[in-house]
Amino acid sequence: MKVKIFFPIAVAVISMISLISCKKYLEVSPQSAFDEQFVFSNVANATGALMGVYEQLTGDNGYGSRLSMMYPYDTDEFIGVTNASAPDNNSRDLSRYNLQPTNGQLALPFNQLYSGIERANICIKNIPVMAMYNNGVESEKQQLRRLYGEALTLRAQFYLELIRNWGDVPALFKPAIDQEDLFPQKTDRDLIYDRLIEDLKTAAELVPWRNEPGVALDERITKGAVKGLRARIALYRGGYSLRSSSKQMERKPDYLNFYKIARDECAEIMARRDKHNLNPSFEDIFKNNINAFKIEPNGEVMFEVALGKDISGRIGYYDGPRFYVSSGTAQLGNSSVRAVPIYFYSFNPLDTRRDVTLAPYYNNADKTKAVQTLVNMVSGKYRADWWNPAPTSASQQTGINWPILRFSDVLLMFAEAENEINSGPTIGAISAYEEVRKRGFKGNEAAIGITPLGKEDFFNAIVNERYFEFGGEGIRKYDLIRWNLLASKIAETRANYTKMLNKAAPYNNLPLSMYYKSASMEVIYSNSLYAPAPTATPVGHTKVAWISSITAAWITNFAQYFKPNHSELLPLPQSVVESNPKLKQDYDY
């Protein structure tokens, strides 16, 4: 059974941290020095404070909803909520790239990320100066050093999320009580990234590897997660981003230096297969581990957000297929993250990842399955009918964890970096790429084809492999941005969507309708997904619109208001700009 990391002591310590961090803003004199001394007087209290930093990853305004299932869409894999026919200055406009600074989905996630940074800063300030940090018994020193490394890592994750969504942001590396200027201006994102890369180098020396003696198998950060996050941040630092001065997507000339950091970090993780490795089965990661509330035993899930049922997290509810707990109860599953039909047909039929990533059905009250129309297919990795134990209520708080980093990402980051550094794939890059691909085609490995050897062709293969591997995990949009491919992939998807609507090649032989058994506990089709459908409904089957469900309106709706060199970043929340005279909107917002 999964061990949740949120301890009861964290509640009290979080309250104390809030008092400490508010001292400068309140015209009162709380004994904050005493509070800090108490919170950071022993390992147990310091651990509680660190749990309060982890807590800022959670909830509707963290990875329980918005950062995981709203901010990453629309892309060439999935689109966000489509339940409004007009602009709403809320979640629909977020998905359609029709953002105003007053959008209702901006301020709370932005503020929560900074709340996480503030809590991390308090820990980073206080833990290394605790008496027992250097002078305690060995077990105390080890525990406190780990806490310090975890705080550095969590702060890096909060900043990464801020930068990849908003670009240049205020950089706060001290608690609010110690800030000289309460109205900070924006800091160049490269300077922040450089600081984070150095911080994570330090953190990697402080935290233990997964499954070392005395290290519990839970959701706390370990060495592999630190190194993997450092590799990811290095690739963002070396990638393209929208710059406020030029209003163009740019990559800095020194980018290869950061690809080398990413390559080296990934290589070190890959050398420790006793700590982190691929699960032999792609489906098993989700069906039998994440959705079974278990820690994945191979160390493939390297960094995940712990979302207990008492900690707001709607994974599987917001994005998954409809599911009834029992006859007569309300339904689970909001189906608000829907697949782009092109994505389904981009998979090789032998790729096992297709039917894990995509759920083409919903569940009836009697647990039989009904097939969705093609345009209503949804995200499938966290589907409610895979949960074990099965849900007993229709609560939206699911308790399903959100994976931030998997070992397959390490393999593909290594392959990408090696290809870029060496102007073509090395043997190691090819091996890492093929390891992920062969797992996806498990049982049909011969169907993976020949790996391309040229630099550009191998890069395109990496782009495609990440497309298939990480669908619905909130990664694709940010990959496309750092490659400067978001605009072209949106245009390509629209063009292919139009071909599918018009039944033009390569989509000219796809079925207009699908027929399935309506009283089945599994999806059983009577006709091929890749050939024209029969004209008459087979006996005992139900007809559902497939290619014929596509309309021009669906194509128009996809990433409807995206503008290159603008929509790659979000506007600052208007309330934040109004509260700080040194901040202004950029990127033509």
Image (cartoon, rainbow, N blue to C red):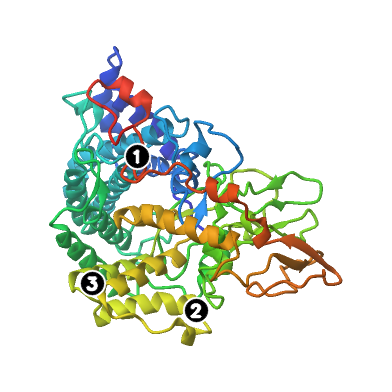
Left/right placement of residue 245 relative to residue 67 reads left
Where does residue 275 sit, x and y in percent of width and height?
Answer: 35, 70
User: Amino acid under label 2?
Assistant: Phe
Label 1 is placed on what type of residue? Ala
| Residue 410 percent location from the top left of the image | 33, 67
Residue 83's place in the image compared with 373, above or below, is above
N-term mark: 2 or 3? 3
Above or below, 4 against 287 in this view is above
Q: Which mark is residue 441?
A: 2
Residue holding disc 3: 418
Picture quarter containing residue 242?
Answer: top left
Q: Residue at x 42, y 39 (%)?
A: 9
Q: Which residue is mark 1?
A: 49
For the view shown, which residue lies furthest in the top direction?
Answer: 27
Q: Residue furthest bottom?
A: 446
- Mark 3: give few (<14), some (14-19) or many (20+) Cα within 10 Å: many
